[in-house]
Image: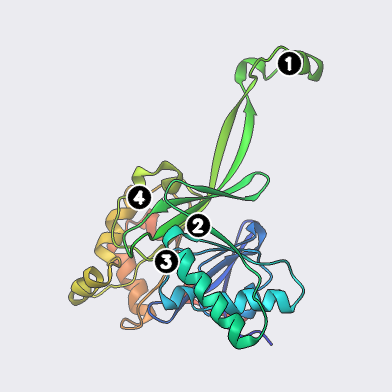
Amino acid sequence: MPSHNLAYYKIDDLEILGYSIAGEETVIAMPQLDICFDIGKAPDQIISIPNILLTHGHMDHAAGIAYYLSHRNFCGQTPGTIIAPQNLLRPINQIIDAWGTLDGNKVPANLVGIKPGDEYQIKPNLFARAFPTKHTNGSVGYCVIEKRKKIKPEYANLNGKQIVELKKQGVEIDYPLELPIVSYLGDTQFVDFSQLNYVAESKILIAECTFYEDEHTTRAQAGRHMHINEFAKLLESMRNEYIIITHTTQRTPMNQIKKMLKEALAKETFNKIILLMGKKRKYNF
């Protein structure tokens, strides 16, 4: 029986499953991409995913690290990879070592430190690029990008033999092409992420919008989270096809959140919105 009742959505050929309530737990998995954004309390359903992209070290986003790594080892899987802000590697190592001592077995792990601008290769043509956010010291968001090469227009009509000959001569017949698939902001206060083209043009944007009531603006500022007023401003400049909202507060009922989003956003933008916790159902691999 799965340990969590996760929300589940499918966008084209990509499955998205997770759970995200402010202060309780946040974990968002995309199995086809071999990634999980944050780890929450390590639901059983995501243990098989080999890469965890950790945005920051708060308990509701990172508590399950040791269990995830240990359970992969128990199941005979390769060591899980934790990609995390560079400044978190030492405390994460300490946690893993402590749990290994308590458990009586060493916990295998592949830890990768990252800072804004760094990339981590997930698959041959798939990369996770880190970018800065404003939440905790060193916190980052991630954009998962597919990298391809596209032939230049002037060579598009050549046959295979002609292309091979040009390559032998050292002619650059193609150019790099980046296709941003999904960007995950993690927890963050307002930043104009539209200045990062790969974030603004990601097919899918997964973004926090924690607070909604007018009287909660000071709570948003204190916790370095986004309020609906800031969120609406951010989306004005974004060009994503789908927008998944995470990290919603329990202080405002979900039906009220939907109503307030509809009032705050342009109709075209609102039609792109998916509230991760707007519906839930069990999901099994």
| Contact between labelled residues 4 and 3, with CB atoms less than 8 Å apart | no
| Contact between labelled residues 1 and 3, with CB atoms less than 8 Å apart | no
Foreground residue among 77 and 45: 77
Distance from disc 2 to disc 1, alpha carbons, whole Å, reads 44 Å
Give the crowd class for mark 2: few <14, some 14-19, many >=20 residues within 10 Å. some
- Residue shown at 75% from the left, 15% from the top: 168
Q: Nearer the viewer, mark 3 or mark 1?
A: 3
Q: Amino acid at mark 4?
A: Phe
Q: Name the spot of residue 236 as percent of width and height, x first.
A: 31, 50
Give the crowd class for mark 4: few <14, some 14-19, many >=20 residues within 10 Å. some
Numbered label attached to residue 193: 4
- Residue shown at 55% from the left, 42% from the top: 179
SS state under label 1: loop
Marks 4 and 1, the one that precedes in the sequence: 1
Q: Amino acid at mark 2?
A: Gly
Distance from disc 3 to disc 4, alpha carbons, whole Å, reads 18 Å
- Check disc 1 and report the residue beneath it: 158
| Contact between labelled residues 2 and 4, with CB atoms less than 8 Å apart | no
- Res 87 → quadrant: bottom left
- Check disc 3 and report the residue beneath it: 56
Numbered label attached to residue 113: 2
Marks 3 and 4, the one that precedes in the sequence: 3
